[in-house]
Image (cartoon, helix red, strand yellow):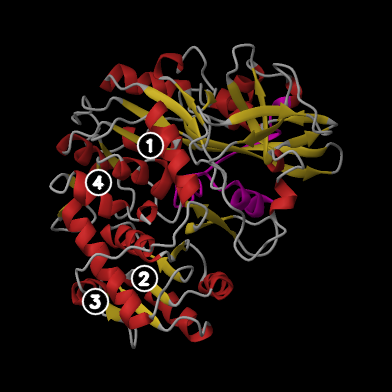
Amino acid sequence: MVIGDTMGRRAIYSPDRLAVVDAGKAARPHYTYRQMNERANRLANWLRDTVGLGKGDRVGIVAHDGVEFLDAFFACGKLGAILACYNWRMHWRELAQVVGDTTPKVLIFSDEFKDSAAQVTAAVPSVTHTLHIEGEGIPGSRHFETTLQAGAPDAVTCETLEAEDTAALIFTGGTTGLPRGAQISYRMIAWNTLNTLIHDILPGETTVNLFPMFHTGGMFVYTLPLLIAGGTVVLVRRFDPALVLDLIETYRADFIGAVPTMYQMLTQAPNWAKADLSSLRFCTSGGAPLPVPLVEQFGREKGVRFKQGFGMTEFGPGIFALAPEDAIRKAGSIGRPNFFVDARIVDEHNRPLPPNQIGELVLKGPSFCSGYFNLPDALAEVVDEDGWFHTGDLARCDEEWYFYIVDRKKDMIISGGENVYPAEIEQALYRHPAVHQCAVIGLPDPKWGEVGRACVVLKPGASASEEALLAFLREHLAAYKVPRSVVFLDALPVSAAGKILKRELRERFS
């Protein structure tokens, strides 16, 4: 059925339009939709004829962003197979557990992860074939491009594919044990694409993808909706601020999406001052509240407007959008729900709360995932009897139906019986002219239960003392919200998607 054959349809509608630029490679190859479809057909034929891959079988990939990631996804779609997108930050023992749980027949890997691939294939008997993207690979592995070209170019389509079938597995952090593989269905992809077209993108536009494609932000926020809509996606191997600025200018990108940490890094790039960003219709920020000074800097120095967004692996991932004209007026808001998403704030008894009351954000709509792979009972932990997905995020909405994430439940600090929200403290810290990045964590305290600690990275050449920052916070926050201490770091730990890893900070200082 054509629902899984994105490149097959695009090769009919816009065969010669530029689809993908692989800017992570020195030669920076360009691919039209016709070429992308041929690559997907060749790989699908090889996977079917040589590996015996069929509907529902898994292909695993642990790789940096590149055209090969999309080749694998689109080839799997032609066969009705499932692409399992593994986090390359995992230790090989963690990776082996996740691979063992999802039992792929094929493992595709970047050269940087060949040692992990060797360990995993030795430990997981389901993996019978390995493909290395570059380098010499491991014993028995085949070169990806050579293998792809060996496949027949004949068209491949899975006639029995249905909208509820799984296209990919994207892994979320499990509360205990292994990460959970969220089952991304074709139904979920279609509704998310429709929401994205209504709220964000226009057919035929161009973006530079800054997220790793094992992450929902890399594959499903803009990359796949834009390719479905006939646009151009420029890929970078890993986030490089100077390169990103050059690519935006060279390819006249219409929009990009990133997290605040990435936008801060762009302003520190050596070519920031001369970079021409005039093509950008907007920038989308998600993952954490966007500091107002950063919004103002992009507007003042580059004329760029921001949209705030919010998404999740299990839902959307596009859930909320804040229009650029509201970026300052509704600073800190994630906006209103996208067209086909319903949202509400509930209390601990699952009762809806009125405006400006803090509770848990719950969601309902057709862009929800189909569950977690090999965990048939896991949905019952997060979906109530009325079908609302409980996000674990503390939030509120105002009288105009604009939503605000207050914090993650797990990040909230309870100090002396009072709820303290680190995100509020961080927003206050970002108003200080010396603060480049910050994260507030809770640490155990025998008297108060927990107290806050602010972890701060200063701007290059700037200086500030612990007492100066604490005094600044006392001018902006209630006394019980002010952290007990401040530590200065050269850098904050960040994930591959650019999010600050508070868990690592808590482990470091606890």
Asked if residue 486 lies in the magenta stretch, the reply is yes
**Residue 351: % across, % down:** 80, 28
Mark 2 or 4, nearer chain start: 2
Mark 1: amino acid: Gly
Residue drawn at point x = 45 percent, y = 68 percent:
55
Q: Residue furthest front?
A: 159
The residues tagged by marks 1 and 4 sit, at their Cα atoms, a distance apart of: 12 Å
Mark 2 or 1, nearer chain start: 2
Q: Residues within 10 Å of mark 2 (few under 14, many from 20)?
A: many
Which label was assigned to residue 109? 2
Which label was assigned to residue 257? 1
**Are the two marked residues, 2 and 1, in contact with CB atoms closer than 8 angstroms?**
no
Pick the front one: 197 or 399: 197
Which residue is under mark 3?
147
Mark 1 or 4, nearer chain start: 4
Mark 4: amino acid: Val
Residue drawn at point x = 64 percent, y = 15 percent:
398
The residues tagged by marks 2 and 1 sit, at their Cα atoms, a distance apart of: 26 Å
Tell me which segment is drawn in magenta: 481-510
